Amino acid sequence: MLNLHLVRIFIAVVEQGSFTRAAEALRISQSAVSRGVQELERQLDTALIDRWQRGITLTEAGSILAAHARQIFALERAAETALAELRGLEHGHLAIGASSTIGIYILPPLLGDFHQQYPGIELFLDIGNTQQIVTHLLAHQLDIALVEGPTEGPELVVKPWRADNLVVIASPTHPLVQRETVGITDLAGVPFILREPGSGTREVMETALAEHGVSISVAMELGSTEAVKQAVAAGLGLSIVSTAAIQLELAQRRLAVLPIAGLVIKRPLSCVQLVQRPKSRALNAWLTFAKLPC
């Protein structure tokens, strides 16, 4: 039978990436963490962690145990939440993951209204690119994910949520802005500012341009939509972003939308959950409030 106390120490080492940080997170000594992992390895008669001077790596057995341990402790948290919610929605915890455009530009007003209606529910919002958010969901760190990039997998339930419009943006002083008409072929060879690999916006953008046979020049890659907008406003190149992300900059005339004849880019935003993860009352309240299809 697994000793869950020792498994909890082990998973802390895995998630923190070192024995030292695990000890700090658990508020015990580093030697106690080391003894705990060693005792778990002795009980299971197998090595779980390879220790190196620069860090740790999991053995095959360690990876298997870590995956199951995350599910065990996620179910434990779900049980605690469900029991607490028997008293009503005065208490609860909701962990939402969102890719950048959704998390920064679409969700904040919704979450603000939701918090006013359910002030006792503790909200956690994890923002990253689509790949990062789905990884965190699979690790049972999130109750639900809202992403802008395509995703699939046997452990996931993916449902379309709403459509998002993307447009080409430029500095108001960019030469193409001054032209009466701009065709798709006019984008060929023009410097573009891209999001990092794994970004849903980047994937949709590259697919749309490739479908029209347009090869662009990559001026730089940046890790956030905010950084992309700043670079475009500074005249470093064009980009393609969601209309939800540029309302303030358009009002301030720091950015301009470049209408491209024949280029319409729409993408579905998706709601993602784990197949076997039970829904808490807090999550059900959020799904109803935000009119999500999950």
Image (cartoon, rainbow, N blue to C red):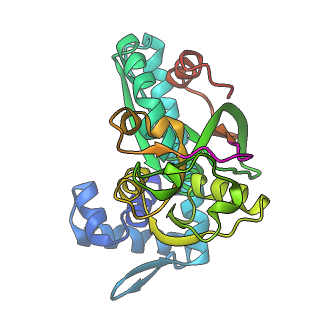
Task: State which quadrant residue 69 falls in.
Answer: bottom right
Dominant SS in magenta: loop
Residue 254: in sight, yes or no?
Answer: yes
* Residue at horizontal 63 percent and vertical 24 percent from the top: 292
* Residue 1 appearing in the image: no
Quadrant where the C terminus is found in the figure: top right
Find out whether residue 263 is within the magenta segment. Answer: yes
> Extreme bottom residue here?
53
Q: Is residue 285 magenta?
A: no
Q: Residue 200: image x %, image y %?
A: 60, 53
Frontmost residue, 151 versus 137? 151
- The picture places residue 107, in percent across and down from the top left corner, at 46, 31
Work out which quarter of the rendered image holds the N terminus and state it: bottom right
Q: Is residue 22 above or below residue 278?
A: below
Left or right, 250 with respect to 209, comes to left
Q: Nearer the viewer, residue 20 or 253?
A: 253
Which one is in front, 128 or 54?
128
Q: Which residues are magenta?
A: 258-265
| Side (left or right) of 198 relative to 266 | left
Q: Position of residue 286 (x, y in %)?
A: 52, 22
